[in-house]
Amino acid sequence: MSRGQHVFFLDMYLVLLLLFCPLSARNRNHNAMIAIALSTTNSLDSSNKPTAVVHEDGDNDKHQRTMQHDVTLDNKKKKERPRIPVLRYENEWVCVNKPASMTVYRGKNTKRSELVLTTTLKRQLSRKVFPVHRLDHRTSGALLLAFNSNMAGVLHDALRHGSKEYVALLRGGWPLEKKDESIVVQEPLRVDGVMKDARTVFECIATTQGSGLSNRQIYNDNGNEICNDEGLIKSLNAGEQADAVLPACTLVRAKPETGRWHQIRRHAYSIGMPIIGDSEHGDSRANRWWRINMGLNRLALHCFSLDIRIRASAANEKKVVDNGEMTNIVAPLPEEFSAVFRRSELQDLWKEAIDQEARLAQEPFDFRGGSFGRKWGNSSRL
């Protein structure tokens, strides 16, 4: 066999090995493959007889260090997938606590390198998932997903007859005299060029009038400065009087009775109390102030609770139960959201909120049952 034929068959062998060899085994044997290829190619003399190739110890160590460095760089390029907290796991559905800044499923505007929840959860649970409803990219909270399309329809119907509760931090104080009075917004919303009915109920959990300064005084263009009584600009960098310039804000419970696009965010904006951190339907000056001074770098909207009438023990029956107890699922506030309320400036607001809604104090949890797979049975229930 000539030298050219030998090199040709060696190249074909390496190509087939790269195509059909698993990635883990390919990385594990990467150094050996390169060494074999170099040794075999360089060891062919003019008579087409293989001869031994002798490497000096220094060159061999340098070659191994280079290969190990390349493997390390390849591993660093892989984006680490975060674990999605599991709130409840059943035979044919699961409820998770969706983190903020993660898209539920991949769309035409989703970047290829961007992590999406459905793909991440499929790898985590080793099962394909079907979202029952959706949450915005920057909204966190409880999200229902089914493990088959039939159950997705069942859960969608159960959720339509059930209820969802959101927790949101709005700009401004509660406008009504009594805190136990709710605000009902029934303003129609435009969806895909068509006006559709929409209804949202806002209930006050806790509110503060802040320092009494107007939004114009607090939310100025500089972001970290305010106008004092004399009209002079005062910097907030000192920190000792940060609570003295706290703007008015209200923590509310939002209950959407319809499911329109950005319904809660648009209805909150329509009553003059936009959600803090909302860059599309909110106040950019207020968002900047809360980001710089309070560390709130996200949309202050969280899907807090789901109520559905479906028996967990009868999930295989694929029936919505019209009688019996309601299944309630609570998604605790994520750390980056609850940390804002634990600051000294908002401690009175947070204390009032805990008194009105004790579930807000619940610590985040994750039901770590491993990768259940399709063989998970009823005996492994919570």
Image (spheres, rainbow, N blue to C red):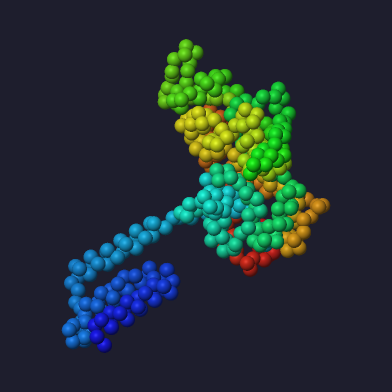
The residue that appears at 32% across and 81% down in the rendered structure is: 9
Residue 312 relative to residue 352: left or right: right
Question: How far across and how far down the image is residue 362, in percent?
Answer: 62, 43
Quadrant where the C terminus lies?
bottom right
186 shown above or below 150: above
Residue 8 relative to residue 169: left or right: left
- Kindly indicate the quadrant of the structure image that contains residue 349: top right
Question: How far across and how far down the image is residue 168, in percent?
Answer: 61, 36
The residue that appears at 54% across and 22% down in the rendered structure is: 215
- Viewer-closest of 363 and 132: 132
22 shown above or below 310: below
Q: How many marks?
A: 0
- Viewer-closest of 343 and 25: 25
Question: How far across and how far down the image is residue 111, in percent?
Answer: 48, 52
Farthest front residue in view: 193
- Kindly indicate the quadrant of the structure image that contains residue 351: top right
Farthest top residue in view: 230
Question: How far across and how far down the image is residue 7, in percent?
Answer: 28, 79
Quadrant where the N terminus lies?
bottom left
91 shown above or below 271: below
The residue that appears at 62% across and 41% down in the rendered structure is: 262
The residue that appears at 82% across and 52% down in the rendered structure is: 323
118 shown above or below 138: below
- Residue 188 makes an appearance in the image: yes
- Residue 360 makes an appearance in the image: no
